[in-house]
Structures are given as structure tokens and as C-alpha cells.
Amino acid sequence: QVQVVESGGQSVQGGSSLRLSCVASGRTSIVVAMGWFRQIPGNEREFVAAITWNDERMIYADSVKGRFTISRDKAEDTVYLQMNSLKPEDAGVYYCAAGRSPINIELYTAAHWFNFWGQGTQVTVSS
């Protein structure tokens, strides 16, 4: 069993930066990838970014490419999402997730490959 807990969400102004954190616990040895998803009000949960745990291969949604950066601290079992140049359309609940399937990083843009999910942290962006 793996538990993930995300934190760092808050209300910010457009154009500012924010860093989200996600700490994994439990049987973290089975985790091969971690990622971030977000749910904008009125929309389905969408992929943001993912990273493989050992090789640090990364993939981003086109909407955040060049603005967001995903990283991981293996020793601390922590993944981060650095968000820069935030826009009002970035607002929503951000979820951290961990996956155990040894698949290509490109497949980790789909939520069904992730097995363990956090409760979410809310990000609000005002114009």
C-alpha cells in the first residue's frame, strides 16, 4: 500500500509562481512513476505532468509546457510541481498520484495507469 499527500495550494495572483509538494509513504519501493493531475471546475480531471522515479524521464501537457516543471527527491520520497506564470485557467484542485506499472512514460498521461491518489490541494489564481 502506498499513500500520497500533496500540499502547497493557495490563492495567488496571475503571473505569480507556486510550488506544490507530494510526499509518498508506505511501500514506496513499488512506485515507478509519479504525476500530477488537475480538475478545473466543470471539467474532467486532466493530466499535467509525470516523472519516472528512477530515470527521471518527464512528460508534460502542452498547456503547461515551458511554465511548469516536475521534479523528484528520491531520498525524501517527494515529488514537486513548480508552477510559473500562472494563469486563471490553471486554477483548480491539483492531485498527486503514484503508479506501479513498468510502462513507457508516454502512457502515464492517462489517469488509469496510476494506482494511488492523494486528496488534492486547491490552487486559486486571480486575474
Image: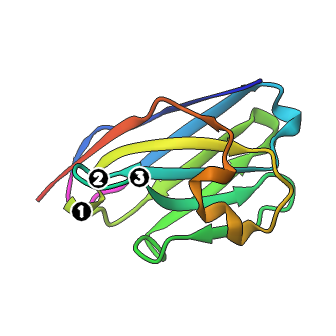
> Nearer the N terminus, badge 3 or badge 1?
3
Residue drawn where x is 55% and y is 63% of the image: 69
- Disc 1 marks a residue whose amino acid type is Glu
From the viewer's perspective, tell me whether residue 123 is left or right of residue 56.
Answer: left
Residue 100: in magenta span: no
> Nearer the N terminus, badge 3 or badge 2?
2
Under circle 2, the secondary element is loop
- Disc 3 marks a residue whose amino acid type is Arg
> Nearer the N terminus, badge 2 or badge 1?
2
Would you name the residue on which mark 2 appears?
A: 40
Residue 83 point in image, percent of width and height? 42, 58
Mark 3 → mark 2, Cα distance in angstroms: 7 Å
Residue 102 point in image, percent of width and height? 86, 56
Would you name the residue on which mark 3 appears?
A: 45
Main SS category, magenta section: loop
Mark 3 → mark 1, Cα distance in angstroms: 14 Å
Under circle 1, the secondary element is helix
Mark 2 → mark 1, Cα distance in angstroms: 8 Å
Which region is colored magenta? 13-17
